[in-house]
Image (cartoon, rainbow, N blue to C red):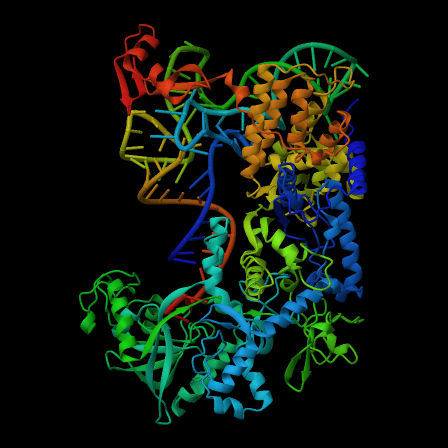
Amino acid sequence: MEYDFREIENHWQNEWKKRGTYKVDIDPKRPKYYVLDMFPYPSGAGLHVGHPLGYIASDIYARYKRLCGYNVLHPMGYDAFGLPAEQYAIQTGQHPAVTTEQNIARYREQLDKIGFSFDWSREVRTCDPAYYKWTQWAFLKMFAHYYNRTEQKAKPITELVEHFAKYGTEDIDAACTTQLHFTAAEWNAMSEAERERTLHNYRLAFRADTMVNWCPKLGTVLANDEVKDGLSVRGGYPVEQKRMKQWLLRVTAYAQRMLDGLDALDWSESLKEIQRNWIGRSEGAQMFFDVEMPDGSMRKLEIFTTRPDTVFGVTFMVIAPEHEWIGDLTTPAQRTAVEEYIEQTKKRSERERIAETKRVSGVFTGSYAINPFSGKRIPIYASDYVLAGYGTGAIMAVPAHDSRDYAFARHFGLDIVPVVEGGDISQASYDAKSGAMINSDFLDGKDVKEAIKLMFAEVERRGIGKRLVNYRLRDAIFSRQRYWGEPFPIRYEGDIARPLAESELPLCLPPVKDFGPTEQGEPPLARVKDWKYELSTMPGFAGSSAYYLRYMDPHNDKALVSKEADEYWRNVDLYVGGIEHATGHLMYSRYWNMFLYDLGYVCESEPFRKLVNQGMIQGRSNFVYRIVGTNKFVSLGLRDQYQTQEIHVDVNIVKNDILDLDAFRKWRPEFADAEFVLENGQYICGWAVEKMSKSMYNVVNPDFIVEQYGADTLRMYEMFLGPVEQSKPWDTNGIDGVHKFLRRFWRLFHDRNGEWVLNDDKATPKELKTLHRTIRKVREDIENFSFNTSVAAFMICVNELGECHKREILEPLTVLISPFAPHIAEQLWSMMGHTESVCDARYPEFDETHLVENTFEYPVMINGKLRFKQEYPLSMTAAELQADIVTKEEAQKWLEGAQPKKIIVVQGKIINIVK
RNA sequence: GCGGAUAUGGUGUAAUUGGUAGCCACGUCAGACUUAGGAUCUGAUGCCGAAGGGCGUGGGGGUUCGAGUCCCUUUAUCCGCACCA
């Protein structure tokens, strides 16, 4: 009987479904293991071969863990709210719910074909009201809490209200948008609307009037991680900065904890580094500079600096054009110039601003500040090189030691005073944080690092500022002027946002017919009659922030996750997904989880213990070369002889870069009568690595591979391609090698006539050695997530076994391979007479004793090269080994009379013998 | 500019973690079986050389008896952040 993967795979997939093989429940008797994939957004294009890469890896790991006796939670679901479905709806008028449903069905069909061990009874969809009830619930909790920095924990906002009523802002250290100061009397005198407005300054989910990323083309605001180089990540449309009233999440409150938490996580260093960069902690000082206001009053301008040591070199100050005080600071003489400049900056898009970072621009406000240390009167400028969103939006400029300040000073002819030795300020600023201080009074002669410390102390002593830590991380803008997302459980009384009661959840997304903004530019929900709730909806990351918790207890309508389920499954042991979520989903999830942890709803502060980023699979495009003006195509090697035009050709009709001529003629009508100039009787195509996309005809559909070779071949081949973490072009060349391997594996159980053979003969020591070497290698490799090498180990093993028909060898080998090729393993397992699924077997243990009768090799260096090897039994201990060969005499005898010129012994071991 | 990663045959990769570089495959070549082969099987295949032999892990230097692996330096590519004060 030949290896009929079609029948085998069909049969076992049905059988798994029928038996509920992959359904899991809490089982306190067994240790848990939670293997999670980043759930997909079900797009209309379906899966290509790149998508399952991570799923296959995690599936192998999940199956392996299960075979090792763990109770494995391995769920799957859909991240179903989001922009593409809605964009499609706007274009076609089809409701996103309908297209999403269709796409999910297609995804499911494709996923099923590959033979994953998902527990589908736990499927979640973020657009399902029963699911997003808990997204809304978490939002309400954030709305009802603030972050107490003294306790480093989220606390009920009611505590804050009580405190305000008794003591005002006295002794409050809370994460907030702006530092407020008021007394209990002032608080008590506030109207309800005023109090509400004040509380938004502290809530973890809050409304604020801030600068946001506005994307006119998408008609919505976007979070920072959804914008790259001034363009929207989705769609690539221009994004502008605009002041708008939006909902935000105070993720900055958790900046330090998110930073600290990274150390204990088993994530790749590069991913942790991306998050560290994104959080962007910098230590410095807050300092106040006295400012002479044009109206004659004095104010204190707050700045942030990481280089307080250079304060004697401050010769001017710069504020952002958006700075609150800009109007007050501008003198009548400068008013026109300043207003013009503000107008000019407003017009420049984010993209232009980024592109023109080298261009120096700015304007003098007319006002002066006093350098608190040198006592000099210094001018205050406004310039867009100072960002409103970072620090306080104002800086002290030290042109001698900051390249941007230097360029600015040069452009406007301002003083440049060096305060650190080491540079040549006539050429450039000296930015390095080392050297001796000069021109700096009490700091003179001190090293920069010491000077910084001394300055911190001095600033605090004089009461003009204090040490401060600043973060680059911004609060996450949480509302989208869109339809296809979770509605906010918020209704308005005038301008006061009132949360819905928990019992009113879920607040369901009402149906609409038109998905675009209204004529007044309001979000689509404004069209819904009697919709008295918030018009915006939540962003994509809302639904994906806690889905891993929901999988633990997906049908619970009393809680996001029950205490019992949470305490059993705890958190994700292994998370597999793309690195593109480093600053989005992976930040928000950690924030969300820490918040729920503070409130006692979850028992682990970090959601994902170990994380593996699978590489991207790029496309490998193929080209044919048409002779210009003809319908004649010339093979790659001969194209230089003609004037040709390069045309993408469907990679599915090319094999090993050789074009299937008939298939090409059938591919498109205009090629029906194509002629070819061949080399060696074949048409060789050119190739290039490009993004996998329809327009380049390089999309390889997994269904196509499954149909041709079977799911097990696809699974193994994707693993064999190289390390999971690595990005690589998809190359179907070579898939035959894996397919051949599976056929050889099949043939281990069949004789030359294809008859099933399995006997109970004793295995030879050599066979046992082969088996156990493979067990050791594969176990190690799976633990290390090195699947390409474990596939290679299987291949070697099968090559070595030849025609082995022994149960003693084949049974463990079948279990060993079942995570990689579950269908064929299952079939063979049942043919061996097992009634239970191979998934219920135990993974074979490595037994060293089978290697004992064999030998290992002890290398000796001769003439600087390893030339001579002696084999010793593995059972030999290090001491015996030493006694045997380590002495010079032994070595000499061992070399059989050859006269060594030199024997080099290091720490009692011969490491080199020179003859 | 700052930070992270990678570099090995024609190709994808491997290397017991400092010990014979190139495992396992793809591709190529040769052979067998075939009416036929995009089937199957066997063998060869890093480069140079007729051979002995020499060279060889992006380049240069170093440590070591010994380096793909450790250190310094340099180049190239990829990724993240970026007027972040």
Task: Please give the name of the residue rendered at 55% of the width and 38% of the height, measured from the top-left corner.
Answer: A783
Using the image as rendered, state which of residue A368 and residue A858 is in the foreground. Answer: A858
Classify A539 as above or below A827. Answer: below
The C terminus of chain A sits in image quarter: top left
Q: For the view shown, which residue lies furthest in the top direction? A: A897
Q: Position of residue A777 (x, y in %)?
A: 55, 29
In the image, taking residue A230 as reference, residue A72 lies left or right, namely: right
Res A570 seen here: yes
The N terminus of chain A sits in image quarter: top right
Classify A36 as above or below A146. Answer: above
Q: Position of residue B54 (x, y in %)?
A: 37, 20
Using the image as rendered, state which of residue A477 and residue A704 is in the foreground. Answer: A477
In which quarter of the view is residue A378 placed? Answer: bottom left
In which quarter of the view is residue A232 placed? Answer: bottom right
Res A672 seen here: no
Using the image as rendered, state which of residue B54 and residue A719 is in the foreground. Answer: A719
Q: Position of residue B53 (x, y in %)?
A: 37, 15
Q: How many numbered discs, if any? A: 0
Classify A150 as above or below A616. Answer: below
Q: For the view shown, which residue lies furthest in the front direction? A: A29
Using the image as rendered, state which of residue A406 and residue A815 is in the foreground. Answer: A815
Q: Position of residue A709 (x, y in %)?
A: 73, 33
In the image, taking residue A484 as reference, residue A401 lies left or right, namely: left
In which quarter of the view is residue A850 placed? Answer: top right
